[in-house]
Image (tube, grey):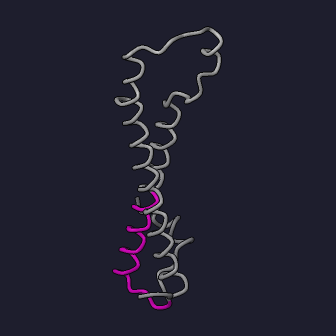
Amino acid sequence: MTEAMRMFGNLLVSGPFPTPETETAYHIVCLILLIAMLICALVAIIIVLFQPGNSTGIDALGGSSETFFGKNKGRSMESRMKKWTIISLVALAICAIIFFVLQLNGVWGIGG
């Protein structure tokens, strides 16, 4: 873990006069945010890949008709997958914004 922190330490600067405590905490928070963004992105990609397509496509040529189960199927698994896609992408956006603000505070000393 310390090697990963040193690797990110070359990219991240914690201000003009960092103390060892604030520098270590800064790197740990940034590393946690990077890992959280990676996990959120992978979850979003996997969920999107498992979602079925919305268009009927070739089924329209075969004349297949909708059944009651087929109409209500969208309320169960498909709606949950769409909801989790939105949740994971919102979490990814929030982590990215927090990470960006930390970078502004750390590199340029902007903010508090």
The question of residue 77 being in magenta is answered with: no
> On the picture, is 81 further left or further right than 10?
left
**Could you say where residue 75 lies in the image, as x and y percent from the top left?**
36, 31
Q: Main secondary structure of the magenta part?
A: helix
For the record, the magenta segment spans 16-34
Q: Residue at 56%, 71% (x, y): give it.
A: 11
**Residue 20 among magenta residues:** yes
Instruction: Point out residue 40 in the picture as x, y percentages from the top left corner.
Output: 44, 50
Extreme bottom residue here?
17
Front position in the image: 1 or 62: 62
Nearest the viewer among 42 and 82 is 82
In the displayed structure, 5 sits above or below 89; it is below
Q: Identify whether 76 is placed above or below 97.
A: above
Please, is residue 34 above or below residue 45 in the view?
below
* In the image, residue 32 above or below residue 63: below
Nearest the eye: 33 or 64: 64
In the rendered picture of this protein, how many numbered marks are placed on residues? 0
Please report the residue visible at 51 percent of the width from the left and 27 percent of the height from the top.
52
Specify the quadrant of the image occupied by residue 85. Answer: top left
* Residue displayed at 43% across by 56% down: 90
* Horizontal arrangement in the rendering, residue 72 relative to residue 41 (left or right): left
Give the quadrant of the N terminus: bottom left
- Name the quadrant containing residue 76: top left
Where residue 12 sits: x, y (%)?
52, 73
Q: Residue 24 versus residue 108: which sits nearer the camera?
A: 108
Residue 50, percent across and down?
A: 49, 30
Quarter that holds the C terminus: bottom left
